[in-house]
């Protein structure tokens, strides 16, 4: 019996990759849908020189997680497009607030001037943090909104952090856990009495060098060294981000990993000698299961045997997001170039933000925009089962209004992504610890990886898979 993986999104494919690398044995990945990649979906229009991304489009090459992804890309020999920190898409981030597009400060000078939508210079918020004492958080966690308001004031919470949370997980900063998304900031503030004080003291603490003790014992990946030297802010994959999961599937197939599509797991049971996966037309015995399924899907397949585990998994909420890709025939339509803009929830508009794809990558004379809508506010704005036409019209109307584009789009595509992003609500870290503790206490041959447990970004879900594989006992261990 071997290990099996449930789910062929990026985390499931990564689990397969790291299992193969560590144990060198054939294995099977079961995927319910007819394709790999999960929410990563690229629609290419090569004949017209542009592409649409239905999910993420760029990856950040920062930290251990960023280095880990670059190591994977290096091993897959995947061609990429770096975006250096000097690039307009890296420098310029905007908000739409108080009826205007506002450029966020991108240099120290921006801290001493008053820039819209803020009503006072941003250095005042830093002073507020320096001279405000620490408050011990109840239950060792609080919302990002509460934390930011306490440390930097309401304006920063409303117009800087809240839209940023919309961009990260389409969530409400009043509900999202600071301990999960910004753990180091939060713990340093709790320990040292302020965010800036914590950052100062943390610089003098002993740092663990991952090169010697962890993931990169043989040295940092060459691509990561190049990214650091050339100051990449982010990068994309040639011909779109879906090339990454496709390349992973190809690599796995070449190394005797069987990716079974349209193979939905309907039930998962455990015994002392392994697990049984129920598929439509088969019962498959395996030694161990790595689940890369969304928490709510895993809950439905373990519920019969482990209702308590299912209940804990269902405590992780998910939101629906609308993605509308829009193409115009001219590349002279944007008054401001940059990565895009976010809309603070206090503006009470149905859109979360707009990404300027054609500022990030060459789109052959087209303007390509991606509008994101809904998230935590999907039901409030769109109700039950909105039509694609209604959603397209709302996106077009707000692009016209916000970006003052009078030209009509030539082409657009609407995606409604149901339950696509987990919400890291207050207490999430403990929730995940309790789920993994249940699995350990009951000695279930089950590992969990993916966005629900270890972070929403591409780097996070790949590293999540790697960490879970590395925690498995080797064949010689009991």
Image (cartoon, rainbow, N blue to C red):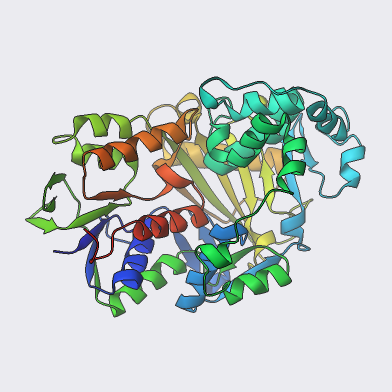
Horizontal side of residue 168 vs 309, given as left or right: right
Horizontal side of residue 401 vs 19, given as left or right: right
Horizontal side of residue 302 vs 416, given as left or right: left
Q: Quadrant of residue 91?
A: bottom right
Please tell me how many numbered marks the rendered image carries: 0
Q: Residue at x 48, y 36 (%)?
A: 390
Q: Residue at x 59, y 42 (%)?
A: 167
Q: Quadrant of residue 439?
A: top left
Q: Nearer the viewer, residue 4 or 100?
A: 4
- For the question of whether residue 469 can be seen, the reply is yes
Q: Residue at x 49, y 38 (%)?
A: 391
Q: Quadrant of residue 196?
A: top right
Q: Residue at x 62, y 41 (%)?
A: 184
* Residue 188 versus residue 328 in the image, above or below: above
- For the question of whether residue 343 can be seen, the reply is no
Residue 251, x across and y down, in percent: 36, 76
* Residue 162 versus residue 19 in the image, above or below: above
Residue 32, x across and y down, in percent: 24, 53
In which quadrant will I find the C terminus?
A: bottom left
Residue 360, x across and y down, in percent: 66, 61
Residue 241, x across and y down, in percent: 50, 64
């Amino acid at each position: 019996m071997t290990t099996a993986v449930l789910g062929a999104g990026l985390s499931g494919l990564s689990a397969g990759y790291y299992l193969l690398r560590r144990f060198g044995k054939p294995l099977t990945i079961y995927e319910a849908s007819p394709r790999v990649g999960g929410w990563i979906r690229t629609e290419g229009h090569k004949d017209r020189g542009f592409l649409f991304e239905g999910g993420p489009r760029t990856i950040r090459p920062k930290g251990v997680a960023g280095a880990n992804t670059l190591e994977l890309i290096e091993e897959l020999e995947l061609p990429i497009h770096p975006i250096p920190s000097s690039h307009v898409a890296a420098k310029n981030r905007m908000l739409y607030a108080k009826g205007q597009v506002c450029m966020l400060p991108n240099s120290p000078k921006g801290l001493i001037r008053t820039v819209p939508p803020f009503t006072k210079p941003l250095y005042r918020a830093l002073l507020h943090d320096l001279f405000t004492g620490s408050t011990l958080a109840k239950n060792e966690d609080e919302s990002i909104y509460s934390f930011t308001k306490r440390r930097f004031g309401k304006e920063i919470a409303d117009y800087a952090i809240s839209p940023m949370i919309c961009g990260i997980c389409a969530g409400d900063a009043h509900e999202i856990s600071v301990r999960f998304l910004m753990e180091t900031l939060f713990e340093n503030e709790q320990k040292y009495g302020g965010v800036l004080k914590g950052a100062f003291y943390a610089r003098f603490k002993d740092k663990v060098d991952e090169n010697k003790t962890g993931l990169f014992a043989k040295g940092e990946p060459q691509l990561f060294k190049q990214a650091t030297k050339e100051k990449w802010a982010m990068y994309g994959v040639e011909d779109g981000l879906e090339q990454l999961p496709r390349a992973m599937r190809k690599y796995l197939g070449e190394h005797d990993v069987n990716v079974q599509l349209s193979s939905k797991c309907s039930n998962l049971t455990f015994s002392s000698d392994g697990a049984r996966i129920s598929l439509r037309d088969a019962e498959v015995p395996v030694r161990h299961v790595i689940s890369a399924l969304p928490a709510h899907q895993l809950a439905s397949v373990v519920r019969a045997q482990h209702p308590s585990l299912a209940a804990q998994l269902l405590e992780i909420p998910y939101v629906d997001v609308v993605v509308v890709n829009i193409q115009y025939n001219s590349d002279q339509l944007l008054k401001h170039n940059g990565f895009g803009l976010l809309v603070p929830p206090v503006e009470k508009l149905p859109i979360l933000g707009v990404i300027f794809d054609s500022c990030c990558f060459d789109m052959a004379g087209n303007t390509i925009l991606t509008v994101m809508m809904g998230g935590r506010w999907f039901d409030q704005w769109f109700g039950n089962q909105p039509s694609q036409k209604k959603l397209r019209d709302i996106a077009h109307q707000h692009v016209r209004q916000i970006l003052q584009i009078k030209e009509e789009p030539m082409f657009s595509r609407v995606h409604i992504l149901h339950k696509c992003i987990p919400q890291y609500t207050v207490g999430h870290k403990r929730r995940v610890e309790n789920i993994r503790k249940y699995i350990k206490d009951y000695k279930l041959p089950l590992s969990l990886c993916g966005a629900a447990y270890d972070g929403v970004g591409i780097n996070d879900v790949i590293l999540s898979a790697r960490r879970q594989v590395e925690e498995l006992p080797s064949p010689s261990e009991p």
